[in-house]
Image (tube, rainbow, N blue to C red):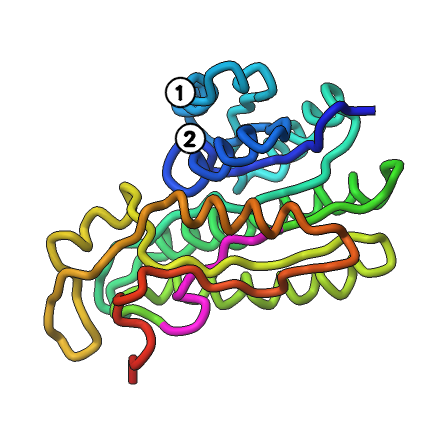
Amino acid sequence: MAESKIAVVTGAGSGVGRATALALLGAGWSVALAGRRADALAATAEAAGEAGARCLPVATDVADAASVAALFAAVAQKWGRVDLLFNNAGRGSPPVDFDEITAEDWRGTVDANLNGAFFCAQSAFRMMKHQSPRGGRIINNGSISAHVPRPRSAPYTATKHAITGLTRSISLDGRPWDIACGQIDIGNAATEMTERMTQGVLQPDGSTRVEPRMDVRHVAEAVLHMASMPLDANVQFMTVMATAMPFIGRG
């Protein structure tokens, strides 16, 4: 039996993924760090200090089902179970007019954001269903874009709306096996991905404006709260956002 609870965090090499992995490690979890770049995962483990001894960095392409299977096989070999999956890995798409979206960018965004989330959730679900004691929790990273789009963001917005459907389906299908599933929708956490917002981003009315951001640690603390609940309780959906960002009031 593992001495601490076991988490898998995808996209753990930077941003929200790194912050959440460090928060989990700080709370005593053991964490498999998944991401495409081994050097970035190593940097996350190093940032954890002594808690880095409870890390398992695994270079993973979530869009590749075989790579995801290898990730969860490594987790099973090291710890024998998984208690939490934070389905966080994803990418954006170039901000171009709808008719200029390339097939490559569409497929790449769907592969990373939706197919990757499915492959990881399915592998975690399979382990959680059959381990003893059974059950666990899956937390999907949605977005404000799971509710409303930004201009010129159809691939990203479509995948994030789909994540909501995936979350609901996992919640329903996981009930008989004590598998809880929730979704955190994040708005303007201060990471490399949102750095452009400090220079101004396109608004629905055609204007450009700087948008407020929030410390990414607030997201990590929210995920930790969701992860720390007993399996008979679930945060189904949570929105964590910079208070003054232009979300409430759109349209």
**Residue 42 spot, x, y in % from top left:** 44, 18
Q: Secondary structure at mark 1?
A: helix
Judging depth in this view, the residue of 119 and 180 nearest the camera is 180
Q: Where residue 55 sits in the image (x, y, percent)?
A: 57, 21
143 up-or-down from 179: above or below: below
User: Which label number is shown at residue 26?
Assistant: none
Range of magenta residues:
139-148
In reply to whether residue 145 is colored magenta, the answer given is yes
- Residue 49 visible? The answer is yes
Task: Residue 159: give x, y in percent of width and height.
Answer: 47, 61
Relative side of 76 to 62, left or right: right
- Looking at the rendered structure, the kind of residue marked 2 is Gly
* Residue that mark 2 sits on: 13
Q: Which residue is found at the position 56% from the left and 53% from the top?
A: 140
- Check disc 1: other Cα within 10 Å, few if <14, some if 14-19, many if 20+: some
Residue marked by disc 1: 43
* Disc 1 and disc 2 in contact, CB within 8 angstroms: yes
- Please tell me which residue is depicted at 48% across the width and 52% down the height of the picture: 113
**Quarter of the image that includes the C terminus:** bottom left
